[in-house]
Image: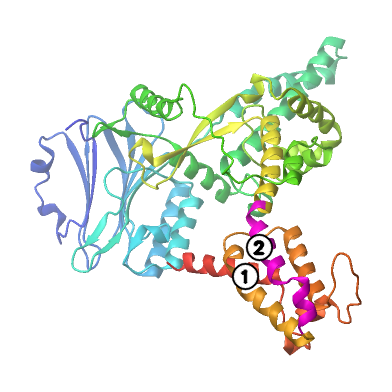
C-alpha cells in the first residue's frame, strides 16, 4: 500500500453486535482505537478505526446513522472531527439526519471530515436507470451549503453503488471536509492599515496630529477601502454566481458555492502513462507538454488557397469588412460582452468599462484605430492567462480538461468587432440562395398572369417550401427577413421597385391567421423560429 491508513470508516457492517468483529486482525496490531454502532433494521452498522499514534479520540457522538469522533491529530492544532455517515432510505429520515448533523456542527468547532453512504445524490447525472428524487437532492445540497462542506474528488469509477440485477447505478458515497477557519489573504492585509488608523484615531483624542500623521491616516483609510472592495469583488468572481440574483457574500449559499468551485477546480492527480500521479511538478510538466504540442505550428509553410472556382463575397460585404471602424461598433462590441467576466490579466471587467464609458472609450478608441491603421497590436495587449475547465465531472486525464484563454479587454474588444462583422457577412452569404430562389419564383411576369387568389396561393407555397431548409439551420438576419417580406408584399399587389402600387390591405393583416380575420399567410420570422425550435426540441428529448 502506497500510503498507510490512519483512519478507517466502514458502513454496513451488518453485525447486530459490532463487538463480535475481530478488529485486531483487520488493523494488524494493537495500536488502534475503535468506535462502533450496532446494526439495527435498515441501518446495517457502522465502525470507525484509527491509529492511536496519529489520532486521539476525546469524544464520541453516535446514533443509528452516524459515528462522530472528536479529537486531535498529530501536527494539527485545531480539533479534528471525523463523521462516518449512513443515510436513511426515507426522505423524511434524511431531512431529520441533516438537521441533526447541522445542530452538532454548530456546537463543535474544528476541521470536519464527513464520509460514508449518504443515500442521496447531488444532481440527476449521479443516477443511471434508477429513481431520481428532486426533493432529496435539494435537501442534500442545502445541507452541504449550510455547513459549507467541500465535496472532495474520489478516484475510481463515476458511480459507487451498483445493482447488477437491473443495472441500476448511483453515486451515494462521498468524502467531504470543512475547515474551521478560512482566513483569507485579504483579511491579513487589512490588519496593518486598521491598526495604524486605530492608533492615530486614539492619538487624535489627546493631541493634534502632525501633517505626516494625517497623510498616513488618509492612506490607511484608502487602503482599507481598496482591500474591502477587492475582497468583495474577488468573492463574486470566485463564486461565478450572478450577483443580482443570489445575494450578498455573507450568505452560506454564497460561501458554499465558493468552496465547491475551489474543490472542483483543484487538480489532485492525473493519469500519466496509465499510472495515477499526484506530484504537482510532474502534473504541471505533463499539462505544459500536452498543450505545447497542441498549439505548436506544424506547418513551416502553409499552402495558399487561390482559385476562381471558390465562391466570393459580394462587393457590399467586402466593403463592410474593410470599412473604417466606428465608435458605434466599439460600443456594440463592449455591450455584447458579459459584465462579470474574469478580469485577467489587466484586472478590468466590462461592467467597469460600461459604467465609466464616457472616460474610457476616449482611451480605447485610439488603440482600436491604431490597430485599424497599422494592422497590428502591441504585444502587451496579447498577454493572456491559461485556464483549464472541466469537461467531465470526474476528470482523470488531461483530456478531461478544456483550455480557455483569459485575455485583455482591449484585445477582446477588437476581436469582438471583427467577429460581429464576419457574422453579418456570413449571414448574408447563407441567405443569398433564398433571395435568388424567391426572386425566380415570384417574378414580375407571373404576378401579371395570375389572379389575386392565385398570387396569394403562390405566396403561401413559396413560404412553405423554398426557405424551409435554410431557415431550419440558422437564425435569419432581420434585414434578410425584411427583404423577403417586401418581395412577397410587392408580388401580391403586382408592384416592383420601378412601379409603386396601392396596397389595399396592410401586410400585418395579410400575415395574420384566418381565425383573427387575416389572410393566413404567416410571417417568415415565425417560420424561422418554429423550424429552429423543432430541432431544439428533438435534440433536447434524445
Mark 2–mark 1 distance (CA, rounded to whole Å): 7 Å
- Which residue in the structure is indicated by mark 1? 466
326 relative to 483, above or below: above
210 relative to 258, above or below: above
Give the main secondary structure, helix, strand or loop, of the magenta stretch: helix
Q: Is residue 538 left or right of residue 127?
A: right
* Magenta stretch holds residue 436: yes
- Residue displayed at 73% across by 89% down: 515
Residue 2, quarter of the rendered image: top left
Q: Position of residue 25 (x, y in %)?
A: 8, 42
Q: Quadrant of the N terminus?
A: top left
User: Disc 1 on helix, strand or loop?
Assistant: loop
Q: Which residues are magenta?
A: 429-450
Q: Is residue 218 left or right of residue 500?
A: left
Q: Are marks 2 and 1 in contact (CB under 8 Å)?
A: yes
Q: Earlier in the sequence, mark 2 or mark 1?
A: 2
Q: Is residue 474 left or right of residue 244?
A: left
* Magenta stretch holds residue 201: no
The answer to whether residue 212 shows anywhere in this view is yes
Q: Position of residue 392 (x, y in %)?
A: 40, 47
Q: Quadrant of the C terminus?
A: bottom left
Tag 1: Cα neighbours inside 10 Å, few (<14), some, or many (≥20)? some
Residue sitting nearer the eye, 366 or 152: 366
Q: Position of residue 409 (x, y in %)?
A: 69, 32
- Residue displayed at 50% across by 33% down: 387
How many numbered marks are there?
2
Tag 2: Cα neighbours inside 10 Å, few (<14), some, or many (≥20)? some
100 relative to 402, above or below: below
Residue sitting nearer the eye, 202 or 505: 505
- Which residue in the structure is indicated by mark 2? 434
- Residue displayed at 66% across by 27% down: 346
Amino acid at each position: 500500500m502506497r500510503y498507510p491508513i490512519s483512519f478507517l470508516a466502514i458502513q454496513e457492517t451488518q453485525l447486530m453486535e459490532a463487538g463480535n468483529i475481530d478488529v485486531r486482525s483487520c488493523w494488524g496490531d494493537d495500536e488502534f482505537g475503535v468506535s462502533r454502532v450496532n446494526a439495527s433494521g435498515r441501518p446495517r452498522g457502522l465502525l470507525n478505526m484509527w491509529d492511536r499514534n496519529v489520532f486521539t479520540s476525546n469524544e464520541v457522538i453516535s446514533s443509528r446513522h452516524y459515528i462522530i469522533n472528536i479529537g486531535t491529530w498529530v501536527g494539527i492544532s485545531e480539533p479534528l472531527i471525523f463523521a462516518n455517515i449512513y443515510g436513511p432510505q426515507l426522505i423524511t429520515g434524511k431531512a431529520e439526519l441533516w438537521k441533526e448533523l447541522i445542530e452538532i456542527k454548530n456546537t463543535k468547532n474544528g476541521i470536519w471530515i464527513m464520509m460514508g453512504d449518504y443515500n442521496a445524490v447531488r444532481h440527476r447525472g449521479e443516477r443511471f436507470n434508477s429513481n431520481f428524487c428532486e426533493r432529496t437532492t435539494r435537501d442534500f445540497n442545502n445541507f452541504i451549503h449550510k455547513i459549507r462542506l467541500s465535496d472532495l474528488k474520489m478516484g475510481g469509477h463515476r458511480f459507487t453503488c451498483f445493482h447488477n440485477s437491473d443495472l441500476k447505478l448511483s453515486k451515494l458515497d462521498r468524502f467531504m471536509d470543512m475547515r474551521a477557519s478560512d482566513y483569507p489573504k485579504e483579511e491579513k492585509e487589512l490588519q496593518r492599515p486598521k491598526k495604524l488608523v486605530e492608533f492615530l484615531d486614539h492619538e487624535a483624542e489627546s493631541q493634534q496630529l502632525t501633517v505626516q500623521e494625517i497623510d498616513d491616516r488618509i492612506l490607511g483609510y484608502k487602503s482599507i477601502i481598496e482591500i474591502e472592495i477587492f475582497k468583495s469583488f474577488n468573492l463574486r468572481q470566485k463564486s461565478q454566481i450572478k450577483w443580482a440574483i443570489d445575494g450578498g457574500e455573507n450568505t452560506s449559499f454564497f460561501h458554499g458555492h465558493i468552496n465547491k468551485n475551489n474543490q472542483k477546480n483543484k487538480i489532485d492527480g492525473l493519469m500519466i502513462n496509465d499510472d495515477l500521479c499526484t506530484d504537482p511538478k510532474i502534473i504541471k510538466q505533463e499539462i505544459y507538454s500536452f498543450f505545447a504540442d497542441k498549439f505548436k505550428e506544424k506547418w513551416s509553410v502553409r499552402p495558399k488557397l487561390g482559385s476562381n472556382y471558390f465562391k466570393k463575397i459580394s462587393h457590399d460585404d467586402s466593403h463592410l469588412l474593410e470599412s473604417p471602424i466606428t465608435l458605434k461598433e466599439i460600443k456594440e462590441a463592449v455591450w455584447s460582452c458579459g459584465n462579470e467576466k474574469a478580469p485577467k490579466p489587466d484586472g478590468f471587467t466590462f461592467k467597469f468599462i460600461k459604467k465609466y464609458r464616457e472616460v474610457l472609450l476616449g482611451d480605447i478608441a485610439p488603440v482600436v484605430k491604431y490597430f485599424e491603421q497599422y494592422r497590428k497590436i502591441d504585444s502587451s495587449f496579447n498577454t493572456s492567462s491559461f485556464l483549464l475547465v472541466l469537461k467531465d465531472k470526474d476528470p482523470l486525464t488531461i483530456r478531461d480538461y478544456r483550455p480557455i484563454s483569459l485575455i485583455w479587454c482591449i484585445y477582446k474588444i477588437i476581436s469582438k468587432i471583427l467577429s460581429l462583422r464576419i457574422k453579418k457577412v456570413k449571414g448574408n452569404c447563407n441567405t443569398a440562395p433564398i433571395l435568388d430562389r424567391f426572386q425566380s419564383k415570384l417574378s414580375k411576369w407571373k404576378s401579371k398572369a395570375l389572379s389575386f387568389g392565385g398570387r396569394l396561393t403562390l405566396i403561401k407555397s413559396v413560404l412553405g417550401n423554398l426557405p424551409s431548409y435554410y431557415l431550419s439551420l440558422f437564425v435569419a438576419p432581420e434585414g434578410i427577413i425584411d427583404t423577403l417580406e417586401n418581395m412577397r408584399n410587392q408580388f401580391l399587389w403586382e408592384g416592383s421597385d420601378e412601379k409603386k402600387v396601392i396596397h389595399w390591405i396592410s401586410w400585418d393583416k395579410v400575415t395574420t391567421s384566418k381565425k383573427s380575420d387575416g389572410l393566413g399567410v404567416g410571417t417568415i420570422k415565425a417560420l424561422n423560429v418554429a423550424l429552429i425550435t423543432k430541432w431544439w426540441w428533438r435534440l433536447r428529448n434524445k
